[in-house]
């Protein structure tokens, strides 16, 4: 990765060091300069940070060399000059968000990944220079957003248990909490890229992002216990944005019958193509065309700039326009629900087929037991005679 980034330089790793590299520029007459690089997990996958260290033991020329993180979050981080916050830090610092490094709103996990990568390489160099790095135990970041998200999930899972007065305004309360907390505040609406990153093994530290695991647990419980896709129907902030726009537009264009018949096939093709690109490249962000992060962070890349206006405009005229015709995440979750229902039906069918067999077996057992009792009684009577 370093060689691909610094194409005209010769990169060699220093013996017995994990994160120390020597860089020789073309036509360089002096000794090779030192570079330090390491990787860590961001929001959507691993990223690689590289930097140099000056004579005063401070980080210089911090660079994001490579990443497979969600592009919108990376753009947001770079636009807020995150690299400048790393430059000038002593290599003995703990590199902790909120302590010696200021965070970036709306992209917490990406920033955590960048600082963790710099920390690993910086602390290794600090020890090599005879310095003592300041290590800090990673804290559990259960913040107000996590608490509100937990309340939102409980409201969705136990909707039928809520008081009647609350159920009356349930959809409105859930919609507002979803858009404010998941969408704008935490900016962590799930996407196919985020779920694919987990399938590829890029699991973020639960201590740093409990919200992600709360959402995943809610989806699994909704799937297994309720047999529903509760994320797309109630927790997804983009779904509620569409619903509000449709009510505001006061239009409801009826889709042609042929489109209704083939809409699922269209989404199936999009889902298959996106998954193939993601897993073959091992880059969850490469085929992410969902506009969620762009809508809530106002940062996006490539085709997202065209898809977001299309999705919002279509919502004025067609109910659940994006969800029904284009969303790959919704289709993936709906497939999981369908599979769960298929397994449940198969189990019930097997149970029904098994009941007569069990009944016949019990009758045979009872008959054999009765016959054996009669024979035993007859033998005893004969012995007495």
Image: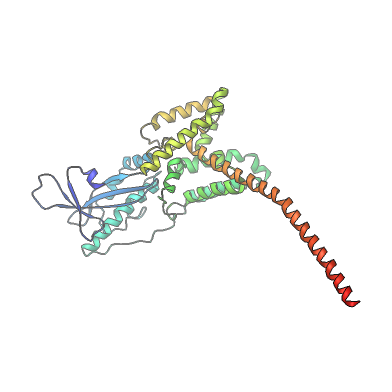
- x, y percentage for residue 282? 37, 44
On the picture, is 240 further left or further right than 98? right
Query: Does residue 251 show up?
Result: no
Give the colour scheme of this rendering.
Answer: rainbow
On the picture, is 367 further left or further right than 91? right
Relative to the observer, which residue lies in front, 8 or 339?
A: 339
- Count of marks placed on residues: 0
Residue, far left? 29
Residue, far right? 385
Relative to the observer, which residue lies in front, 233 or 112?
A: 233
- x, y percentage for residue 269? 47, 33
Seen in the picture, residue 223 relative to 327 is either above or below; the reply is: below
- x, y percentage for residue 112? 36, 51
The residue under the point 47% across, 42% down is 190
- Classify the position of the C terminus by image quarter: bottom right
Relative to the observer, which residue lies in front, 3 or 37?
A: 3
Answer with the quarter of the image where residue 373 lies: bottom right
Residue, far bottom? 384
- x, y percentage for residue 1? 26, 46
The residue under the point 49% across, 39% down is 329
On the picture, is 169 further left or further right than 364? left
Relative to the observer, which residue lies in front, 326 or 361?
A: 361
Query: Does residue 380 show up?
Result: yes
On the picture, is 362 further left or further right than 152? right
Seen in the picture, residue 56 relative to 174 is either above or below; the reply is: below
């Amino acid at each position: 990765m370093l060689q691909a980034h610094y194409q005209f330089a010769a990169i060699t790793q220093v013996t017995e060091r994990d994160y120390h590299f020597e860089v020789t520029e073309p036509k360089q007459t002096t000794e090779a300069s030192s570079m330090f690089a390491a990787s860590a997990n961001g929001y959507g996958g691993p990223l690689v940070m590289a930097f140099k260290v000056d004579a005063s033991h401070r980080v210089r020329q911090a660079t994001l060399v490579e990443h497979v993180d969600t592009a919108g979050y990376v753009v947001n981080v770079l636009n807020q000059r995150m690299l400048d916050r790393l430059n000038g830090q002593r290599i003995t610092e703990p590199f902790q968000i909120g302590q010696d490094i200021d965070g970036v709103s709306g992209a917490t996990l990406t920033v955590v990944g960048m600082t963790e990568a710099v920390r690993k390489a910086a602390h290794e160099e600090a020890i090599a220079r005879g310095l003592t790095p300041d290590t800090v135990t990673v804290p559990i970041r259960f913040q107000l957003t996590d608490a509100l998200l937990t309340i939102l999930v409980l409201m969705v899972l136990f909707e039928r248990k809520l008081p009647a007065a609350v159920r009356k305004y349930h959809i409105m309360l859930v919609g507002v909490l979803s858009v404010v907390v998941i969408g704008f505040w935490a900016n962590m609406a799930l996407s196919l890229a985020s779920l694919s990153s987990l399938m590829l093994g890029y699991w973020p530290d639960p201590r740093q992002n409990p919200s992600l695991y709360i959402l995943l647990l809610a989806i699994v419980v909704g799937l297994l216990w309720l047999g529903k896709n509760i994320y797309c129907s109630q927790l997804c902030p983009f779904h509620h944005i569409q619903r509000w726009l449709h009510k505001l537009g006061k239009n409801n264009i009826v889709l042609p019958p042929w489109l209704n018949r083939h809409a699922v096939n269209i989404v199936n093709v999009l889902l298959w193509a996106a998954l193939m690109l993601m897993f073959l490249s091992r880059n969850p962000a490469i085929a992410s065309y969902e506009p969620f992060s762009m809508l809530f962070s106002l940062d996006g890349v490539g085709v997202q700039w065209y898809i977001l206006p299309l999705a919002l405009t279509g919502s004025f005229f067609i109910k659940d326009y994006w969800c029904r015709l284009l969303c790959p995440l919704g289709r993936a979750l709906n497939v999981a629900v369908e599979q769960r229902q298929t397994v449940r039906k198969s189990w019930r069918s097997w149970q029904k087929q098994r009941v007569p067999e069990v009944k016949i077996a019990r009758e045979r057992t009872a008959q054999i037991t009765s016959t054996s009792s009669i024979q035993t009684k007859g033998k005893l009577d004969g012995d007495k005679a």
